[in-house]
Amino acid sequence: MSLFNTTYDVIVVGGGHAGSEAAAASANLGSHTLLITMSLQNIAQMSCNPAMGGIAKGQIVREIDALGGYSGIITDLTAVQFKMLNKSKGPAMWSPRAQSDRMRFAEEWRFRLENTPNLDLFQDSVVGFLIDGNKVVGVKTALGLNIKSKAVIITAGTFLNGLIHIGDKSFGGGRAGESASHGITEELNALGFESGRMKTGTPPRVDSRSLDFSKMIIQPGDLNPEKFSYSTLTSPLKEQLPCHMTHTSLEVHDMLREGFDRSPMFNGRIQSTGPRYCPSIEDKIDRFSTKERHQLFVEPEGWRTNEIYVNGFSTSLPEDIQDRALRLVAGFENVKFFRFGYAIEYDYFPPTQLKHTLETKLIDNLYFAGQINGTTGYEEAAAQGLMAGINAALKIQEKEPFILKRNEAYIGVLIDDLITKGTDEPYRMFTSRAEYRTLLRQDNADLRLTPRAFEIGLVSKERLNRVEEKQSKTDLFVHFLQNASIKPSEVNPILEEKGTAVINQAMKMFKIAARPQLNFDDVAKFPGVSEFISTNNLDREIIEQTEIHVKYAGYIQKEKNNADKLNRLENVSIPKNFDYFKIKSISIEARQKLTKIQPTTISQASRISGVSPSDISVLLVFMGR
């Protein structure tokens, strides 16, 4: 079929992490989808660090995978190292992270998309939209094509009027070596959308052959690495590449300060807001002036390349300052640069202009996903792309929208934060943002979300069966521990060895296994436990699930109870276009904020900044509750 006479179901604009997940989800739900990107060679490019996951971000990748997205699978297939972060803390904080082979990651995404049914790819730049009334009906491209569609998803990343800065120099670009995108912001502004500017930075890339790793601290991967994807398509790594750690020094800081007046991220030449939690090296030295050194992580970019990512040295300082300062870092004395660090500023659209489906409130069937919504990070972008792709496809098929609540997924927290609270600085996910993080663990994302994905047709029955088997085997093991008793003579030697109180009468295994001093290697020594595990073919994943349930049962139940209370407010709907100004007994600020955000439920209204508990009480009365 020709582009000139085809009306697509969904057009996705941009081929980054958000665009790739959006296109895959839409196509896999049966919608005829077109992905338009400025460069087919750079699909799903890792513009910044060559890694997926991390604190809270790893949970998001597991959720994407549980919902049928591709990010977890592709990370596993292209990883060079895997680590489970925060293992010394409770399981709500455990977060998987993988270093990836940058080139293989993009290549694998390209092959995956090319082999996805219902999905076409096209290289061009979108410069505007076809609008009919208040509905989008297609896009206009730089080649002069008008391509029709029933829905459009914009995932433009940092490319909207992108401007790159290195020292005193600045030039247009959406990423090093790639041009910026022009026209989209201007057209959206003309349609009535509000836009702003944000900034971010990236460190230099250097040649590993010029570094002295003997002066650095080796950072190996996990001894028994896990993987991201729950599918059977991937396996844990057998070999891993090490990362390394080194530090800046007062001498390095003094050298960097010589260029502060020439750093656009620091001297005010870039007025837009940068990421609070991933500051430039200039910001770190200024904000933490009493610190004598900062960590730098030396991360390989892949199996067969010498390129190194200098994590922690994000900068827009002039090239000569970058060169002189980095040579003062231990192990970098003879460093050779592949490219210098730089800052980039770009347009974004405050996400309060969106619905929970990521459809815009102003224009029907137009969706925003990724950094256009003010987020930072591959994982946050991919999650939004997945949800936008799902919802665009479902709307066209006249099906109910797919919305995740705050107690169901980190993805639900992410989207609700964005559209309810908005953001005026690059938003990144943290475990602290999720009030139900004990429920939203990385280990149970499949149990939480795969049944939901199966309902809409995004995962197979085979995959659902594996999830159901995991749940049933976990329940079986928990039931066994709850009902099996153990005598003092059988368990006291173990309890004494672990320095915890002995028992003087028979007790249920569950109660003893819940003690923090014991791990499940100890529990496996209880009479009959090893035999039960062997007979029922319980693998490490089942044992981990059971251990978490046993040790954290009280916390999990408490959070479930709190979530149930929240859901009662989620069920109190607010009529569309409700006139808050007719309720004189709520504050003026609340009326203004409620009118702007247009929350769909009382629960969402309660999370808007400036809306007080007393305002919510008045609304509940007004809604007849």
Image (tube, rainbow, N blue to C red):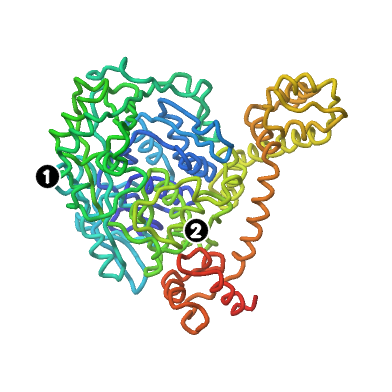
Q: Nearer the viewer, mark 2 or mark 1?
A: 1
Numbered badge on residue 516? none
Mark 2 → mark 1, Cα distance in angstroms: 46 Å
**Label 2 is placed on what type of residue?**
Leu
- Residue in the picture at 48% in, 54% down: 390
Q: Mark 2 highlights which residue? A: 394
**Label 1 is placed on what type of residue?**
Lys
Q: Position of residue 205 (x, y in %)?
A: 24, 31
The answer to whether residue 258 is left or right of residue 156 is: left
Secondary structure of residue under mark 2 = helix
How dense is the environment of label 2, judged by Cα within 10 Å: few (below 14), some, or many (20 and up)? some
How dense is the environment of label 1, judged by Cα within 10 Å: few (below 14), some, or many (20 and up)? few
The answer to whether residue 515 is left or right of residue 204 is: right
Image quarter for residue 538? top right
Q: Nearer the viewer, residue 584 or 58?
A: 584
Q: Mark 1 highlights which residue? A: 169
Q: Position of residue 503 (x, y in %)?
A: 82, 28
| Sequence-wise first label, 2 or 1 | 1
Up-down: is 216 above or below 113?
above
Secondary structure of residue under mark 1 = strand
The answer to whether residue 482 is left or right of residue 260 is: right
Image quarter for residue 360? bottom left
Residue most extreme to the right: 505
Q: Position of residue 297 (x, y in %)?
A: 34, 29
Up-down: is 373 above or below 228?
below
Q: Position of residue 411 (x, y in %)?
A: 49, 50
Up-down: is 518 above or below 109?
above
Up-down: is 585 above or below 75?
below
Residue most extreme to the front: 290
